[in-house]
Image: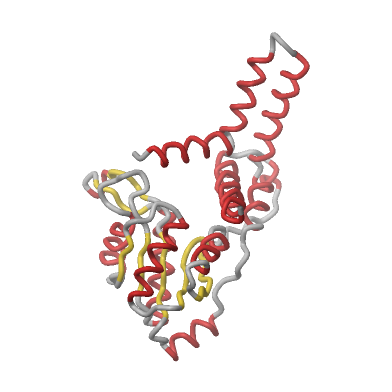
Amino acid sequence: MEPTAIFSKLLELLILPPGHNLLLFAIAFGLLSKSRKLAISLFLLSFTSLFLLSLPIVSSSLQEGLYAHPALPATEIKRISQQQPQDMAIVVLAGGRMERSPEYGDIDTVSSKTLQRIHFAAWLHRKTGLPILASGGSVYGEATAESVLINQAMTSAYGISPKWIEFNSKNTEENAVYSSELLKQNNIQQILLVTHANHLARAKQVFEEQGLIVIPAPTVFDKHRNKWSSYLPSARALSETQEALHEYIGQLWYQL
């Protein structure tokens, strides 16, 4: 694993929950003998913030705040399918992998998140006839790039093969840089950008910075109904909160 990837992962663990809660707890424990009042305050802050960030009502609000773009309208899909612009393509971004899946003979395959994106990209391809570019490299130095795994999954499960495979990127910004190079070499100026709804705002920004015209094509709008269990902490809600905060921090980082 590359040093930059290790540093990025460690930084993420410290900033996002439950890492920062555990860090506060450790600091509080270290201060017990020096300042009991401050230590107790940090203990309470650690516990309270972890409790709140584990509530479905909080995680769903954070997630929905990231939905900057609505679903691609049926009228727009119809327009594209009728016109079939020669300078347009579908770009689907990788979203992780399942390592050494035993049911596939201990080989890597796409994660559930990547599969959700593949499913929508394949559906758009059938509706519009546009070619597909799969983007995603080996984030932690794995032998097989995530875009290659996308190609394998799309070919075997959907009978569709991406026209181009970008396999050098390790993050969203690099997805945009390396994908735009491939696209421009093939006279593609407009893209339908397929990724999760909570990730699209950040992805759209970096692709537009590469000079491409981006039509948002978000998938997976995870809407929660407000019910009594929305006020009970859960591991799933904490995971969704962590994912949402990752996106907010990513947006801030790209702005800076």
Count the marks. Answer: 0
Q: Residue furthest right?
A: 37
**Between 238 and 190, the one nearer to me in the picture:** 190
Q: Residue at x 27, y 67 (%)?
A: 155
Q: Would you place residue 83 above or below residue 52 in this image?
A: below
Q: Residue at x 55, y 59 (%)?
A: 202
Instruction: Look at the image and name its color scheme.
Output: secondary structure
- In the image, taking residue 205 as reference, residue 4 lies left or right, namely left
Residue 123, given in percent of the width and then of the height, sits at: 41, 73
Horizontal arrangement in the rendering, residue 53 relative to residue 162 (left or right): right
Q: Residue at x 63, y 65 (%)?
A: 68
What residue appears at the point 71 percent right and 10 percent down from the top-left corner?
A: 34
Q: Position of residue 20 (x, y in %)?
A: 60, 32
Image vertical order of residue 51 relative to residue 88, above or below: above
Quadrant of the rendered image containing residue 223? bottom right
> x, y percentage for residue 64?
64, 58
- Residue 92 location, x and y as percent? 41, 65
53 or 188, which lies in front? 188
Determine whether 161 is above or below 226 in the image.
below
Residue at the bottom extreme, as displayed: 82
Name the quadrant of the N terminus: top left
In the image, 50 versus 24, the foreground residue is 24
Which residue is at the far left? 105
